[in-house]
Amino acid sequence: LTLGLVVLIAFPLTLLVLNSFRDVTAGNLGFGLSHLTLGNYEAAYSSPRTFTMLLNSLWFAVGSMIVALLLGGTLAFLAERTDLRFREFIPAIVMVPLIIVQKGIAWIFLLSPKIGLLNRVWQGLGFDGPLLSAYSLPAMIWVEGISMSTLSFLLIGATLRRMDPTLEEAAFGSGASTVKVLYRITLPLLVPALAGVVLLLFIRGLEAFEIPMLLGFNARIFVFSTNIYYSLRGAFPPQYGLGFAY
């Protein structure tokens, strides 16, 4: 297992870190010690645009994590801890984001300022300008949050399913109100699972690429993933060392 982890994780990570300190092109990438420089880090972290990108990345990761947590957590609670009618259909509905591959393109068809269906209907009613724009940070947060809500639902739902309901019944039997039971019993039991879900969703938000690329790239809203992509594929000549530094 350790050998497998070294091959799959340590080897490429070492290659990435080493080449971030080199002035390299596609032809001399590798474990060499030539062309060593700190210029990549100086260029990356002395630019004011980098801190704008960092702020965008944090807003995007935190915002999408909150959206996913609220959507997935609420649906998990309704499916597992209530007697809501037709709650057995909630898991099937929540799985839809996993089935739809091109979620970003779908939202472009809905909210593009020029071709978006909702915006065309809005303008057909006589209003000037689009109702909402798909090419904005709030739209990126919303779409990524919906995409990650399935993961939030599965993890929180599993925790709710394993909870012992007799603890809450005992509290109700002792005269506690619903709010007090939620605050003193349910939430403390959920805290470990919620902490793990929050950390996982935040990391997934930081590493997300598809939605920031489709919705943010044209609007020049860069996050870490799209900034790395631009350094490697968009710039000419490709700035491999700068991308590795990011």
Image (spheres, grey):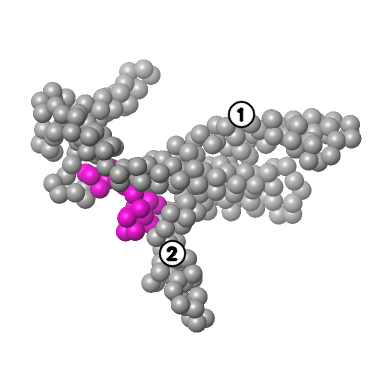
Q: What amino acid does circle 1 point to?
A: Pro
Quarter holding the N terminus?
top left
Q: Nearer the viewer, residue 63 or 6?
A: 63
Asked whether residue 171 is in view, the answer is: yes
Asked whether residue 19 is in view, the answer is: no
* Image quadrant in which you'd find residue 41: top left
Name the element at disc 2.
loop
* Image quadrant in which you'd find residue 50: top left
> Relative to 195, is 227 on the left or the right?
left
Total marks in image: 2
Q: Residue furthest top?
A: 2
Q: Which residue is mark 2?
A: 133
- Discs 2, 1 touching: Cβ within 8 Å: no
State the separation of the CA atoms marked 2 and 1: 37 Å
Q: Which residue is mark 1?
A: 192
Above or below, 101 relative to 54: below
Q: Nearer the viewer, residue 66 or 171?
A: 66
Q: Label 1: how many residues lie within 10 Å, few (<14), some (14-19) or many (20+)? A: few
Q: Nearer the viewer, residue 119 or 109?
A: 119
Residues drawn in magenta: 210-232
What residue appears at the point 71 percent right and 54 percent down from the top-left corner? 86
Name the element at disc 1.
helix
Disc 2 versus disc 1: nearer the observer: 2
Q: What amino acid does circle 2 point to?
A: Ser
Magenta stretch containing residue 23, yes or no?
A: no
Q: Position of residue 82 (x, y in %)?
A: 75, 46
| Magenta-drawn stretch, dominant element (helix, strand or loop) | helix
Q: Position of residue 228 (x, y in %)?
A: 28, 42
Quarter holding the C terminus?
top left
